[in-house]
Image (cartoon, rainbow, N blue to C red):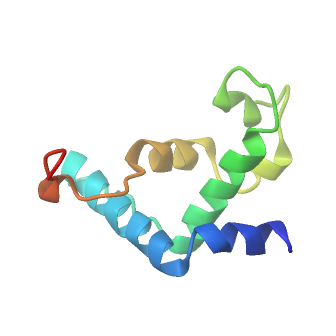
Amino acid sequence: MSPLQYFKQFFSEDILEVIVEQSNLYAIQCDANKPLNLTTKELEQFLGTVAYMSLFGLPSTCMFWNNACRVFQVADTMTLNRWEAIRTSLHFSNNEEKQERGK
């Protein structure tokens, strides 16, 4: 089984679409002037970079894009600014439909 096939067993298209929808909604809830416009493909790329980055011991995420220790598998996938925007807005549920614990 390939790493991608293994990943798809845990993250179905439906789950990825919910994450994309909720992340885009959260970004607008935070600032209507800065929509995220995240796509499923871009979310998969983001999650792939996060998994790959976990293999390194760099003390700061920005170092993956820094010229001195640039990791091209990450840096060539998306810009640091885009990666940070996705990380900041990554959301899995709608805050407006939040339920209290135990209910």
Q: Residue furthest bottom?
A: 13
Residue 31 seen in the current view = no
The answer to whether 77 appears left or right of 30 in the picture is right
Position above or below: 62 against 38: above
Front position in the image: 102 or 45: 102
The answer to whether 30 appears left or right of 68 in the picture is left
The image quarter containing residue 20 is bottom left
Q: Residue at x 76, y 75 (%)?
A: 5
Q: Residue at x 81, y 66 (%)?
A: 3
Position above or below: 19 against 29: below
Q: Position of residue 60 (x, y in %)?
A: 66, 24
Q: Residue at x 49, y 44 (%)?
A: 87
Residue 47 seen in the current view = yes
Q: Residue furthest top?
A: 59
The answer to whether 79 appears left or right of 68 in the picture is left
Q: Residue at x 72, y 57 (%)?
A: 77
Q: Residue furthest front?
A: 102
Front position in the image: 5 or 67: 5
Position above or below: 58 against 91: above
**Looking at the image, how many numbered discs can be counted on the residues?**
0
- Quadrant in which the N terminus is drawn: bottom right
Q: Position of residue 75 (x, y in %)?
A: 74, 46
Q: Position of residue 90 (x, y in %)?
A: 42, 51
